[in-house]
Structure formats: structure tokens, C-alpha cells
Image: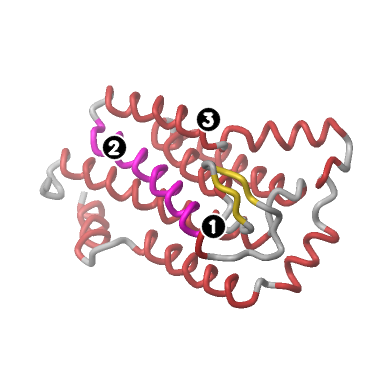
Amino acid sequence: MHMDRTVAGTAYADGMPRAVTLPTAGFLLLAVLVQATDFDILNSFARRHLQPLADGHGHPTLNSLAEALVTPAAPSIAVLAMAAAAGLLWRTGRRHAALAWPAALAGGLLVELVSKLVVQQHRSGVWHGYGLTLDSSFPSGHMLRAIVLAGVVASLWPRLGPWLAGWCVAVATCLQLTGWHLPTDIAGGVLAGLALAAGARSIAARESLAVRGEVPAE
């Protein structure tokens, strides 16, 4: 119990947890560097050598498998899955978590859209989404949403954590192999997703501690 109180004090006394601030800072730094340099060497190498399934190349079965692995992180499916997860959280009395995780997903959609408007990833293909056509793909919304979805599912069934982490790695790999995204896009999605998921977990953890009487509820 003493350890729990110490952790709670460390997490909340100093404001935003480092699990949120560190990936947020990393994402902002990466966005600035993408805008300034385009990471020409890295992205050029990736387009030449790390996209064997791009543009319909590769075995059709592999393309179909890659698409199937990434599809759950598509915007519409992610929203439906998040709604179902939030409903389960609400029914089990985890009201803050039931609101925090959908807010994280909504924040991810906003981060993706604003970033694509502001950061020009010139070595990407033309991006279509939310009724817009933009010459930028930074960050990968699929990668971002995969991490947030994995987080909310893990909050419901912690034993699935390793499998969900494996799925996120598979999504990142498929996004690269199929040419849907460049490495910097995927890295941006990872950083943004980690920050948003950590924020949701922080809110959920505070609620849990408050119920146990270790942190006063706000």
C-alpha cells in the first residue's frame, strides 16, 4: 500500500506524468524535423527497399493479410470498437476511463488532421481522408489509433497485453511493407499514440486510486 501511495504521489504531484510528456515532446520534435528536412536519406531508402508490397506488388495473399491486420485501426472501425470498449468500462463503474479513452481517440483524430495540414511530408503519396486531399502523410493515423485501441482493450483484459503489443508491431510493419506510410510517419503515429494512451491510463489510474482512498477524487 505504501508503494502505491508513493507511485501516486510521483505520478500526480508533479503534474502531467512523464509517460505523457516524453512522447509528446518526441512527437513535436519529430514533426519539426520532418518539416525541416523531410528525412530524405531514410525515407528514400525506405521507398526503394522497404516497401515490397507497395502498389500491388508482392503475393496477393500477403497484401490481403497486411490489409486485414491494419483494418481494425481504420477510423470508422476504431470509433465503433472504442464505443464498445467505453460501454464496457462504463458498465463496470469505470466512468472516468469510459470517457478518457474515447477522448484519446478523438484527440488522435485531431492530431492527425492538424499535423497533415501543418507538416509537409513531401516524400509521401497524396493523402485522402475526412473529405480532404493533402500532400502529406505525417503522422500515420492507423498507427496512432492502433496504439490507443490496444490500450483500451488492455485496460479491459490486461492478459491480452503482449498480444496487443504484437499487433501494434504488426501494424507498423504492414504500414511500411505496403507503402502506406514512411518510417517517419509510423514513428510519429507511435509517439502520438503513446502520449494519448498514457494520458487516458493516467486518468483511469487516478480514478482507481480515488476509489481506494489513496488519492482524493476531484
The answer to whether residue 90 is above or below residue 54 is above
Q: Give the residues drawn in magenta, as a range.
A: 94-116
In the image shown, does 86 or 135 lie closer to the viewer?
135
**What's the residue at 75%, 50% (across, down)?**
179
Residue under label 3 = 77
67 relative to 118 in the view: left or right: right
**Distance in Å between CA atoms under marks 2 and 3:** 18 Å
Q: Quadrant of residue 67?
A: top right
Q: Residue 89: x, y in percent?
A: 32, 29
Q: Nearer the viewer, mark 3 or mark 1?
A: 1
- Residue 43: where, in percent of width, then height? 73, 66
Q: Secondary structure at mark 1?
A: helix
Name the secondary structure under disc 3: helix
Q: Nearer the N terminus, badge 2 or badge 3?
A: 3
Residue type at mark 3 is Ile
**Mark 2 to mark 1: distance in Å?**
26 Å
Residue 103 among magenta residues:
yes
Magenta: main secondary structure equals helix
Q: Position of residue 38 (x, y in %)?
A: 66, 71
Q: Earlier in the sequence, mark 3 or mark 1?
A: 3
Q: What's the amino acid at mark 1?
A: Lys
Cα–Cα gap, marks 3 and 1 = 21 Å
Q: Mark 2 = which residue?
A: 99
Q: Nearer the viewer, residue 125 or 66?
A: 125
> For residue 116, which numbered disc appears in the image?
1
Provide residue 47's location: percent of width, then percent of height. Answer: 80, 59
| Residue count near mark 3 (Cα–Cα under 10 Å), binned few <14, some 14–19, many ≥20 | few
Q: Residue at x 58, y 58 (%)?
A: 138
Name the front one of labels 2 and 1. Answer: 1
For residue 172: magenta?
no
